[in-house]
Amino acid sequence: MKTLIKDITHIQTGLFAKPAGIGKLVYLQSKHFDEYGHLHAVLHPDLADDGISEKHLLKDGDVLFAAKGTKNFAAVFENHNEPSVASTSFFVIRPTDKKMLPQYLAWVLNSHTTLALLKGQAIGTSIPSISKQVLENLEIAVPSIETQKAILQITKLRNKEKSLKQKIETLREKQIQQQIINAIK
């Protein structure tokens, strides 16, 4: 079944704020993520909570979509007991349909096909930006929960395979270099 994202989610923009370096909230920015949407930094509360609306606080399972710049990705927010808000670099996508896993939505948004489609509709030249309207009108397939889980498991195993191949290649390179050094001696 295909559906528009706006029919199965609530989408809002992140919050514009200036982190103070110390505070009660974590202010998530694109720089906290690698190009695959994985957090690569230990985060500390760096934003005061004065005047921050409850609607901007992230909930477990919210999907963050980096819509500004050339590094577009989706990541599922996992609440680790630190109240957090997203910066304006992100759209916060909150699934409203229980028939769709947040991790599956992030997988769809991170797919090469979807990213190419969204980037093709981005506006702006120096800093390309994907609009909320473009995101809302993205049509996606929503298979059964079982199929979504299977897709996510296959993806996890494929990523593990890629990582293991890379480690094998690195070790093989070290082995060859050592053999060359031993041959020279």
Image: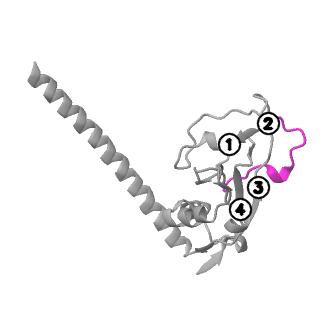
* 60 left or right of 18 in image: left
Task: Say whether marks 4 and 1 touch (CB < 8 Å).
Answer: no
Disc 2 designates what residue? 18
Is residue 12 positioned above or below 52 on the image?
below
Sequence-wise, the earlier of marks 2 and 4 is 2
Query: In the orientation shown, which residue stands out farthest toward the front?
Result: 125
Relative to 83, residue 134 above or below: below
Q: Give the residue pinned by disc 1.
A: 29
What amino acid type should be assigned to the residue bearing mark 3? Thr
Q: How much space separates mark 3 and mark 2, taking CA atoms?
A: 16 Å
What residue is pinned by disc 3?
13
The three-letter amino acid code for the residue at tag 2 is: Lys
Residue 139 at what x, y percent from top left? 62, 74
Compute the Cα span from label 2 to label 1: 11 Å
Tell me the magenta residue range.
48-61
Q: Position of residue 176 (x, y in %)?
A: 18, 34
Res. 82 in view: no
How far apart are labels 4 and 1 at the CA level? 18 Å
Of tags 3 and 4, the one toward the viewer is 4
Residue type at the position of mark 1: Gln
Q: Are marks 3 and 2 in contact (CB under 8 Å)?
A: no
The amino acid on which the numbered mark 4 sits, given as a three-letter code, is Ser
Who's the residue at 58% across and 51% down the image? Answer: 70
Magenta stretch containing residue 173, yes or no?
A: no
Give the secondary structure at mark 1: loop
Q: Is residue 52 magenta?
A: yes
Q: For the C terminus, give its image quadrant.
A: top left
Q: CA distance from mark 3 to mark 4?
A: 10 Å
Q: Which residue: 24% across, 36% down?
A: 173
